Image (cartoon, rainbow, N blue to C red):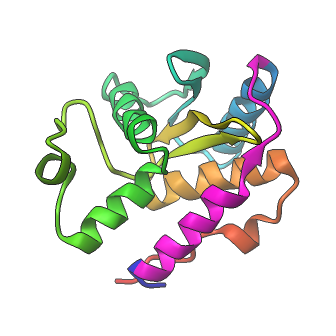
Amino acid sequence: MGLREDLEKITAQEQDLRLPRLDAHVAWELGSKLRTMALERRHTLVAEVRRFGQPLFYAALDGTTPDSPEWVRRKGNVVARFHRSSYGVGMTLKLKGTTLTERYGLSVSDFAADGGSFPLNVERAGVVGSVTVSGLSQRDDHNLVVEALCGLLGRDFTELRLGPEEA
């Protein structure tokens, strides 16, 4: 799957994966689902669900480092700024041959356009938060979040999953 096709699929994911609401209960369900999936697959990662300005769920699995929450924060900042997935923003920048710093003057110490953070779009409210993981490859981080959202919303992940990355 090429860059343009990936971006089309990511746009579809962002449009289709809408929550009826985001509260502490929904955040706990989504975060717990991510944590369980990671444990079952023996992934080492950090997961966070936040309403902008308010963390609602956080889990750091064994093997993560103090740098892991920094990646979560920086990826989440991209979603808060652009209301798009961090992977989608990164791929768009790559397609245009630029970076967050060059295009927007954003510091790499506060923003990371790498896969793993996804906007939480609530019906009739818009993007109100993000769900973020860090610890796998950026494509796998992105896919894991999309899979968890699909599970929460009763959607078929195979329809929305990004396929293997082209070399």
Residue 127, compared with residue 160, is above or below; it is above
Location of residue 30 with respect to 142 vertically, above or below: above
Q: Nearer the viewer, residue 64 or 112?
A: 112
Residue located farthest toward the front when viewing the structure as drawn = 124
Q: Position of residue 112 (x, y in %)?
A: 30, 43
Q: In this orientation, which residue lies closer to the viewer: 140 or 116?
A: 116
Residue 137 visible in the current orientation:
no
Q: Which percent across, then down, holds residue 48?
A: 56, 28
Q: In x, y percent, where is residue 110? A: 25, 30
| Residue found farthest to the right | 154
- Which image quarter is the C terminus in? bottom left
Residue 50 visible in the snapshot: yes
Q: In the picture, residue 76 is in which quadrant?
A: top left
- The residue sitting at 70% across, 35% down in the picture is 125
Query: What secondary structure is the stretch in magenta mostly built from?
Result: helix
Q: Is residue 103 magenta?
A: no
Residue drawn at x 43%, y 60% as measured from the top left: 88
Position of 16 compared to 87: left or right? right
* Image coords of residue 45 (percent x, y): 50, 37
As displayed, is residue 143 above or below residue 39? below
Q: How many marks?
A: 0
92 sits left or right of 163 in the view = left
The magenta segment is: 4-24
What residue is rendered at 38% in x and 31% in y?
Answer: 68
Q: Nearer the viewer, residue 151 or 95?
A: 95
Q: Closer to the camera, 77 or 104? A: 104
